Every structure is written in C-alpha cells, then in structure tokens.
Image (cartoon, rainbow, N blue to C red):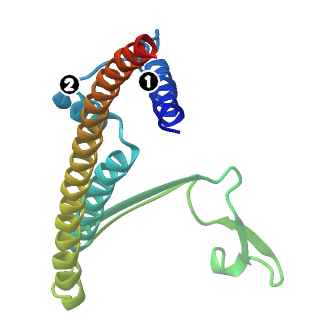
Amino acid sequence: MKFSYKLFVIVGGWLLSLQLNAQTQPSQDVQTFTLDQSIEYAIAHNPNLRSASLGVKSAEAKVGETLATGLPQVGASADLGNNFIIPTSFLPAQIVDKNAPPGTYIGVQFGTQYVGRAALNVDQMLFNGSYFVGLKASKTYTELSRKDVINSKTDLVVAIKKAYYSVLVSRERLALVEKNYQRLDSLLRQTKAMF
C-alpha cells in the first residue's frame, strides 16, 4: 500500500512538472517584461484607461461649451440679390402728365437691379443664475473625470502588481515541484535498489 502511494506521488509530481514545463517553454510570441515595463505597457494599451482619458477631454470640451454661452455672441449676415427684370407698376398717366386722357396708364419701375442687405448682431448675457451654476457644475464634472482617470490608473497598476506577484509565486512553486520531483525520483531509485 505504501509503495503504490509513493508511486502515485512520484507519477503525479512528474506529470505536474511536465504540464508546468510545457507552459513555460519560450516561444516566438512570448515577451518578457519587468514590473515597470508591464505597468507602462498596460497604461499605454488599456482600453478602459483610454476611455477615461477621452472622458476628461469630453468634460473639458463641455466646460468650454458652457463657458462660451456666457461670452458675447456675434452674428453677421449678408444678402445680395439680382433683379433680372425690375418689377413694373402701372399708375394713371394723369399723375405724370396733366394733359393725358383719363383711363390711360403709364408703366413705372420702382427699385434697382441689384439689392443688398447686411446685418450685424451682438448679444451679451448680462445675468443668468443657471449659467453660473452650470459653469460650476461643469468644472466639478471635469475634476471628477480627472479623478476617474487617476482611479482607473491606480486600479490597473494594482491589478498588474498582483498578477506579476502571482507569476513570481508560480515560478517559485514550479522550482519547488522540480526539486520535489528530483527528490522523489532519487527516493524511487533508492527504493528500487533496496527492493
């Protein structure tokens, strides 16, 4: 019974070391990083962190938009029209010529061939309580967005450090398994020799 138990432990340890060895074999796609390199890589390529950074830019744009509503608003417009045919109005001929027979009309054109118009508008908000509240709220929103980026970055660094630590622990465990395998192998050889 003891011999089969020892054999089971030896075979189990050997299979475990083969499996761990197969997973740690270097291949062409594997890159190795230090902890600092891992953190830098994750900060540069993490989509959640990028999203949070874009949120800060969006919040800053909203602050600018809110601020712009309180600044003077200037608008200008211009129109130019060409009357190809100047409208003609018919008036009684007696207005122009006192000797003209009654019931006769004369065509008179009012207007010019080109018509133009230009306008300039300037508006300024003097006081609006909701504007000041909105401005304060938008600045708070920007600050919250910045804190969200810092929070996301901190969470990412913590997760990377935990993962890196777990890899280091796994390597140490692998080394212990290999040492146990060597001990068990030598123990098996000694037991065979004694048997």
Classify residue 136 as left or right of residue 56.
left
Alpha-carbon neighbours of circle 2 within 10 Å: few (<14), some, or many (≥20)? few
Decide which of 187, 147 is in the foreground and name it: 187
| Chain-order first, disc 2 or disc 1 | 1
User: Identity of the amino acid at label 1?
Assistant: Ser
Decide which of 68, 36 is in the foreground and name it: 36
Residue 16: x and y in percent read 47, 29
Residue 28: x and y in percent read 46, 9
Up/down of 26 relative to 177, above or below = above
Residue 104: x and y in percent read 82, 77
Which circle marks residue 169 in the picture?
Answer: none
Residue 170: x and y in percent read 31, 34
- Choose top left, top right, bottom left or bottom right for residue 172: top left
Point 19% across, 58% down: residue: 146
Of labels 2 and 1, the one closer to you = 1
Point 80% across, 80% down: residue: 101
Query: Label 2's element?
Result: loop
Query: Label 1's element?
Result: helix
Point 37% across, 50% down: residue: 48
Decide which of 154, 2 is in the foreground and name it: 2
Classify residue 123 as left or right of residue 143.
right
Query: Which residue matches tag 1?
Result: 17
Alpha-carbon neighbours of circle 1 within 10 Å: few (<14), some, or many (≥20)? some
User: Identity of the amino acid at label 2?
Assistant: Thr
Up/down of 76 relative to 12, above or below = below
Point 35% across, 15% down: residue: 186
Up/down of 41 relative to 141, above or below = above
Query: Which residue matches tag 2?
Result: 34
Up/down of 110 relative to 161, above or below = below
Q: Residue furthest front?
A: 195
- Choose top left, top right, bottom left or bottom right for residue 68: bottom left
How far apart in space, not on screen, are marks 2 and 1 (Cα)? 25 Å
